Amino acid sequence: MKLQHRAAALTAAAVLALSTLTAPVTAFAASEDAAENGILDLLPAPLRDLIDPENAPLRIAEQGIFSAGGTVIRSDGTFDVGNYYTSHVDHANVLYQIPENDTELPMVFLHGYGQSRMGWMTTPDGREGWSDMFLRKGHSVWLIDQPRRGEAGQTSVAGTMTTTPSDQTWYTQFRIGTYRNDQFTYNEGSQFPRGEEVLDQFFRQMTPDTGMDNDAGDQAIDNTVVAQAVAATIDEVYARTGKDSILVTHSQGGLPGWEVPLYTDHVAAIVAIEPGAAPEVGSDAYNAMVEQNIPVAFYYGDYIGQQYTDVPAAAMWSMMASTADTFTAAYTAAGRTSTVVHLPDEGITGNDHFMFQDLNNDVIADHIENWIQQNVQ
């Protein structure tokens, strides 16, 4: 017993000494002089990680991959070696990671048109993506390949692939810049990373949808199929963690994202990154969101509005963004929370449709985290 008391006393003394020393050591080690002279590298790893958490190793407690939702289709007749009989199709494929400091709500990420979960995981120039950033903030992340896309390519609908070149079209639509005199240009003040290798990596993120006619401009995506698979994912997250999920959508993924609450009551909030449109006021999706009291945030980048005459897609995106204002007026009048964030109004400029891959993606991630802390229970 005496040894136990002595050990406890020594532990308490060590904690007190560390707390006394941490403040001055932290202040010095975080200074420019300490950084320039490599002082941080001389400290023990736990203290170094405490002082400089952004550069601390990311520690994952659990990770894996699973499928969620979907259906099984059957052919006529009975099975024999010459007659294929069943296919498991139209599900979501989900890669998940749970950090050691799992203190916050799970975040489920749903990509946009021509994309997969890869876009959340990295940037074209190889920097840290949002999935790692939010892991560091204490969220588990659940990264979806939506039905008929990426690693969830099994489909009940026969699509048609195309070889029609479209890089320049999407580059312009995404408001990164334009294509002039046989070269890609950037909008003034653009935060998109630059260089030929960067663009090569960016364009190679694009992937076709196996269930649609992929000729340029066709986006005949079944929102119900996607929404049901995302809802099944969120239900699985709840079964595994006991927590509701924050759903983060992008672009085309925003449209089925609004329908997800029709199929699950475990959505804690929706953060929509430049969705194709807001839900129509009075629609079934809108009513489900009102009933479940789901906080919503819309995020829009720069180069949106009629004043950007040199940005071809600016007017189109202005029209799309206006739907968020209509939604928010009705939603807040119903006593619910909806926030429309135009990043330039926050002093965050130069962002395009892929703000989560821009050079200041960490700044935007911090802004979203602040919104979550203020608005999501």
Image: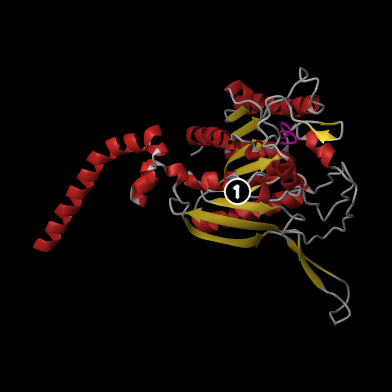
Say left or right for 336 vs 15: right
**From the image, which quarter does the N terminus lie in?**
bottom left
- Measured as percent of width and height from the top left, residue 216 is found at 88, 43
Expressed as whole percent of the image width and height from the top left, the position of residue 137 reads 48, 43
Q: Quadrant of residue 16?
A: top left
Residue 206 in the image: x percent, y percent? Answer: 77, 48
**Which of these two is toward me, 299 or 359?**
359
Magenta stretch: residue 280 in it?
yes
| Kind of element beneath mark 1 | strand
Apparent side of residue 20 relative to residue 132 in the rendered image (left or right): left
Residue 300 visible (yes or no): yes
- Main SS, magenta residues: loop
Tell me how many marks there are. 1
- The outermost residue toward the bottom is 80
Residue 164, above or below 34 = below
Snapshot quadrant of residue 85: bottom right
Q: Which residue is mark 1?
A: 108
For the residue marked with disc 1, what is the amino acid? Answer: Val
Residue 275, image x, y percentages: 71, 36
Name the one closer to the observer, 281 or 325.
325
Nearer the observer, 124 or 250: 124
Residue at image position (68%, 26%) is 302
Q: Is residue 182 left or right of residue 101?
A: right
Q: Is residue 51 magenta?
A: no
Q: Which residue is rendered at x = 66% and y = 52% of the image?
A: 144
Residue 326, relative to residue 40: is it above or below? Answer: above
Q: Quadrant of residue 315?
A: top right
Residues shaded magenta: 275-281
Colour convention of the picture: secondary structure
